[in-house]
Amino acid sequence: MENILEFFLLNRNVIFIVILSIFLGIEVISHVPAVLHTPLMSGANAIHGVVIIGAIIVMGHAETTGAMILGFLAVVLGTLNVVGGFVVTDRMLEMFRKKK
């Protein structure tokens, strides 16, 4: 317990910035119109491909089994996010196509 308290005391500036970032992110996201939500999310999911590449690189340099498992989990979850983003984008674009 002392280690946790010491960590918070030593890193209170960083923790404060993270908490402020969370509140700012919630405030910004809550004011995005519904029309823009899907295109913005699909773009964010496409950018997540960079995370997949980073996770693969980290897995290549992993020295412990735990690091390898976390890297593999990051690759799997990132891939699911990217694929899901493209599926949602495809469904969204389907709404704007002319019906036969």
Image (cartoon, rainbow, N blue to C red):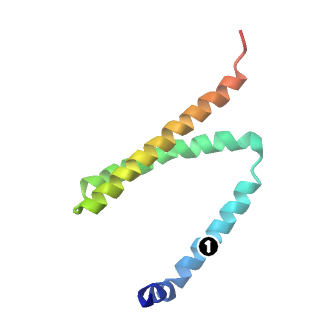
Instruction: Between residue 73 and residue 40, name the one nearer to us.
Output: 73
Q: Identify the residue at horizontal 72%, vertical 15% (top origin).
A: 98
Q: Identify the residue at horizontal 68%, vertical 68% (top origin).
A: 23
**Where residue 91 appears, x then y in whole percent?**
63, 28
Looking at the rendering, which quadrant does residue 37 occupy? top right
- Residue furthest to the left in view is 63
- Image quadrant occupied by the C terminus: top right
Task: Mark yes or no: residue 58 visible.
Answer: no
Can you identify the residue that label 1 sits on?
Answer: 19
Task: Mark yes or no: residue 69 visible.
Answer: yes
Instruction: Between residue 56 and residue 3, name the one nearer to us.
Output: 3
Q: Secondary structure at mark 1?
A: helix
**Where residue 86 appears, x then y in whole percent?**
54, 34
| Number of marks drawn | 1
**Where residue 12 appears, x then y in whole percent?**
54, 84
Q: Identify the residue at horizontal 69%, vertical 19% (top origin).
A: 97
- Image quadrant occupied by the N terminus: bottom left
Identify the amino acid type marked 1. Ile
Q: Identify the residue at horizontal 74%, vertical 56% (top origin).
A: 30
Disc 1 packing (10 Å; few <14; some 14–19; many ≥20): few
**Where residue 58 appears, x then y in whole percent?**
31, 56
- Residue furthest to the top in view is 100
